Image: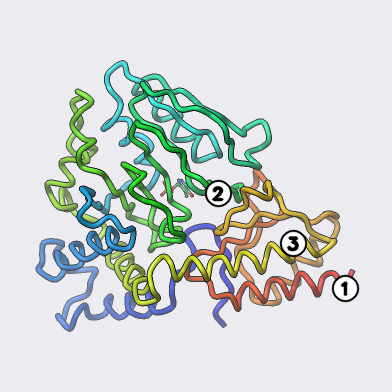
């Protein structure tokens, strides 16, 4: 039986993506070849890469606005250093919002390239909220933020306005909600949270911000080289890019980001309403910053954990335990999760209330 998969990443993808991508492993486009064995330079795969790149921009509303989409390797973690390599001037400085573990990992890498100014941090509160009311230095080379803090279950509801380039790690909420994406100069996201299997990273770059920092950049780390090579500077992750394309096509057929955002809000509402109503549970994150993608919550009485854990496992739920730095539970409700799965979890929470 198919599980209700609440894993934070790698995570649930649309069932049709599993089906179509497994078919392509056996025979890709009736070519008599598997997607796993074709050349990345073949006409069929070049078409996949081109469509994935243009569909990513189309869904974000960034087509024809000076942006390029790339599918790179190395995960979101490699972008932690590619961003400063490409944008920070020699002896320059960059501004960072420290809103979680991933944000602080990005700061650590940027320190190799120059000064980092942390505009605000919620570390002292174990990152249970997104800092607000900070100011961004106008002389920094860029401002970096994390739109959704996967581990802590918080999400930026407002993106600050500034005159310096804005870089955003959207690994865990890309394509999940409408934003004015033109506010960003670089958006990056590891595929494995909302777009595809692990192994590729979507990077969306506003071309005009490149080539200005006066550094020599090794080719493989140079966004401009990847753009020139149309995301084929070296062998791309052929299968993850193909599966990502299938997910993007699924999203477009669903009605794009506007349509999925409504579904995501309905799922999050359903679960948070139960967390707030049920006397056995409490939310882990500040209410105003609650993530629509990753809901973190705790049992008021940890002694109920044994019974609760047995009950949700019995109901076919997988991947619910929280990250070790928060404890409790984390329900990751990415785009592909049906609301029926959220109802199963809510039913288990209500059954626990009756049982104890
Ligand atoms: C998972 C995650 C990362 C790390 O992604 P990798 O692709 O494993 O390097 C970075 N940032 C955020 C917000 C994440 O959720």
Q: Which residue is mark 1?
A: 355
At horizontal 69% and vertical 62% (from top left) the residue drawn is 272
Question: Circle 2: is it few (<14), some (14-19), or many (20+) Cα within 10 Å?
Answer: many
Q: For the residue with label 2, is its CB less than 8 Å from the closest atom of ligand 1? A: no
Q: Which residue is mark 3?
A: 275
At horizontal 30% and vertical 81% (from top left) the residue drawn is 23
Ranked by sequence position, the earlier of labels 1 and 3 is 3
Quarter containing the C terminus: bottom right
220 or 53, which lies in front? 53
Q: Work out which residue is located at the far right of the displayed protein and give it.
A: 356
- Distance (Cα) linking label 1 and label 3: 17 Å
80 left or right, relative to 346: left
Q: Position of residue 53 (x, y in %)?
A: 23, 59
Q: Position of residue 61 (x, y in %)?
A: 31, 58
243 left or right, relative to 66: right
Q: Position of residue 56 (x, y in %)?
A: 29, 60
297 left or right, relative to 235: right
Q: Which residue is mark 2?
A: 155
Question: Circle 3: is it few (<14), some (14-19), or many (20+) Cα within 10 Å?
Answer: many
């Amino acid at each position: 039986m198919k599980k209700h998969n609440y894993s934070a990443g790698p995570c649930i993808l649309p069932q049709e993506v599993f089906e179509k991508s497994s078919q392509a492993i056996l025979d890709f486009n009736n070519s008599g070849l598997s997607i796993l064995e074709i050349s990345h330079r073949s006409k069929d795969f070049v078409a996949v890469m081109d469509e994935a790149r243009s569909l990513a921009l189309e869904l974000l509303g960034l087509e024809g606005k000076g942006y390029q989409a790339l599918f790179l390797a190395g995960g979101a973690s490699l972008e932690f250093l590619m961003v400063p390599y490409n944008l920070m001037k020699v002896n320059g400085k960059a501004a960072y919002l420290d809103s979680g573990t991933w944000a602080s990992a990005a700061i650590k890498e940027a320190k190799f390239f120059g000064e980092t100014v942390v505009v605000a941090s919620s570390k002292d509160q174990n990152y249970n909220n997104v800092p607000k009311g900070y100011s961004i230095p106008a002389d920094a080379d860029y401002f970096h933020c994390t739109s959704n803090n996967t581990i802590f279950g918080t999400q930026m509801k407002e993106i600050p306005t500034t005159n310096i380039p804005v870089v955003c790690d959207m690994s865990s909420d890309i394509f999940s909600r409408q934003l004015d994406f033109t506010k960003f100069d670089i958006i990056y996201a590891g595929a494995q949270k909302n777009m595809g299997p692990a192994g590729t990273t979507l990077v969306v770059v506003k071309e005009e911000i490149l080539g200005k920092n006066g550094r020599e950049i090794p080719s493989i780390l140079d966004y401009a080289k990847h753009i020139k090579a149309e995301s084929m500077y070296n062998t791309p992750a052929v299968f993850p890019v193909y599966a990502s394309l299938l997910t993007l096509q699924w999203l477009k057929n669903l009605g794009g980001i506007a349509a999925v955002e409504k579904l995501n809000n309905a799922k999050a509402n359903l679960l948070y309403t139960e967390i707030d109503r049920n006397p056995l549970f409490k939310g882990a994150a500040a209410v105003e910053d609650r993530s629509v993608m990753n809901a973190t919550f705790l049992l008021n009485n940890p002694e109920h954990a044994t019974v609760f854990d047995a009950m949700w496992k019995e109901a076919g739920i997988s991947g619910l335990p929280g990250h070790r730095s928060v404890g409790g539970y984390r329900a990751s409700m990415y785009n592909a999760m049906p609301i029926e799965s959220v109802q199963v979890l809510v039913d288990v929470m209500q059954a626990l209330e009756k049982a104890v």
